[in-house]
Amino acid sequence: MHALITADTMGGVWTYAREIVTGLVRRGVRVTLVSFGEIPTQQQTAWMDPLQFVDFRPTAFRLEWMQDSERDIELSSEYLAGIVREVKPDILHLNQYCYGDLPVDVPRIVVAHSDVVSWWVAVHGEQPRESRWMRWYRETVERGLSAATTVVAPSRCMIDAVSTYYTCLPQSAVVYNGRNRNLFNPHITKERYALSVGRLWDAGKQVSLLNQIDPPLPVYVAGSEEHPETGCRTRRSNTHNVQFKGMQNETQLRYLYARAGIYVATSRYEPFGLAPLEAALSRCAILANDIASFREIWGDHACYFETNDPASLQRELQNLDRDQGQRARYANAAYQHALGHYTTERMIDDYLDLYRSVVAAEATAA
């Protein structure tokens, strides 16, 4: 089988693409990978070096959620359609909505990782105001969803969101994200600090919540402070025992996960959340904001603070810090839950089953 997969290099979708591409190639699938957003660095693409059967086509076309991206989307769609006609894949695995209606005769899976409207509602409590760009964005997403053979999301919450804010989905499936357990170390002795990972400029990640408490132990925050569109850096201060580490490379992050006793998931918008999963695979106790997607993903295997409430976050963090037994129980529960549900192997199994069923259905219909 030959899959053409799209990705962007500016966030968690790149990590997701790494897991998908690596897993598929190791199962004998030929992959053409096309990236958008920014040309990736050598460090970002080093994981491809040992892989065979990967045809990588990096581009710097702007992404659909960026302002004034209309012309780039038009040009990148033409470019992508040309690649499809050139390499003739069996299936398209599209991680952007805008390519769902690509004018090619190939079955396509569109993956709904996140979107502007549901992010806005989670952050602001209401839908965004109408504007020329917002009308274009909504129409672009709706066309892509409607033209998809199947729409996939990493949680039922995300399927519900795109159904609510855009269009009734023709066919949909939930495929939970997975990570390679071998990349993380759950066996190192823990130190007395908590960790949180998230873009400081993204209000959906709500890292600012940590600046509203006086934590009883050091809290390290890793993540970008510079907005990818504006270039503006987020104002922050190292106060109240909260230490901002800035961007961390993979080795640095793995060390932080391995040593952290607690992972604090502050997001108010998180369709899945790869960082909490990485923390769970490192045997951290997860303290999560009480939102529907975290409840769906982690159930009783995480500790929760009241939704967006800094006082509750303070109390639960103090309780976990004081009670070593409780902290260990939550850490072990998250670790075992991750191993049972959110590994790369399970994710690849699910996608291969989906690929085969979609391709077979299209062949029968033809």
Image (cartoon, rainbow, N blue to C red):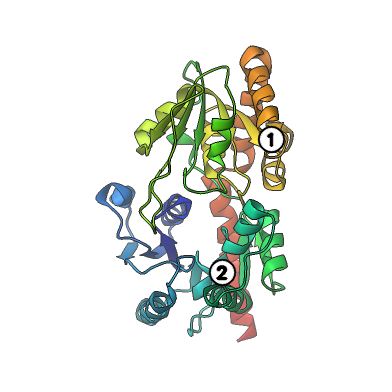
The residue depicted at 61 percent of the width and 30 percent of the height is: 286
Q: Position of residue 153 (x, y in %)?
A: 62, 59
Of pointers 2 and 1, the one earlier in the residue sequence: 2
* Residue 148 against residue 202 in the figure, above or below: below
Q: Which mark, by number, is residue 115?
A: none
Report the front residue among 350 and 74.
74
* Residue 105 against residue 142 in the figure, above or below: below
Q: Position of residue 32 (x, y in %)?
A: 38, 66
Say left or right for 302 vs 82.
Answer: right
The residue depicted at 68 percent of the width and 47 percent of the height is: 293
The quarter holding residue 89 reads bottom left
Q: Position of residue 95 (x, y in %)?
A: 50, 64
What amino acid is at disc 1? Answer: Asp
Disc 2 marks which residue?
109
> Visible in this render: residue 198?
yes
Q: Residues within 10 Å of mark 1 (few under 14, many from 20)?
A: some
> Visible in this render: residue 50?
no
Q: Position of residue 1 (x, y in %)?
A: 46, 67
Report the front residue among 302 and 132.
132
Report the front residue among 268 and 12.
268
Say left or right for 149 vs 196.
Answer: right
Disc 1 marks which residue?
309
Mark 1 element type: loop
Report the front residue among 353 and 102.
102
The residue depicted at 61 percent of the width and 73 percent of the height is: 130
Tell me the quarter of the image containing the C terminus: bottom right
User: Which of label 2 and label 1 is nearer to you?
Assistant: 1
The residue depicted at 53 percent of the width and 38 percent of the height is: 207
What amino acid is at disc 2? Answer: Ile
* Residue 10 against residue 300 in the figure, above or below: below
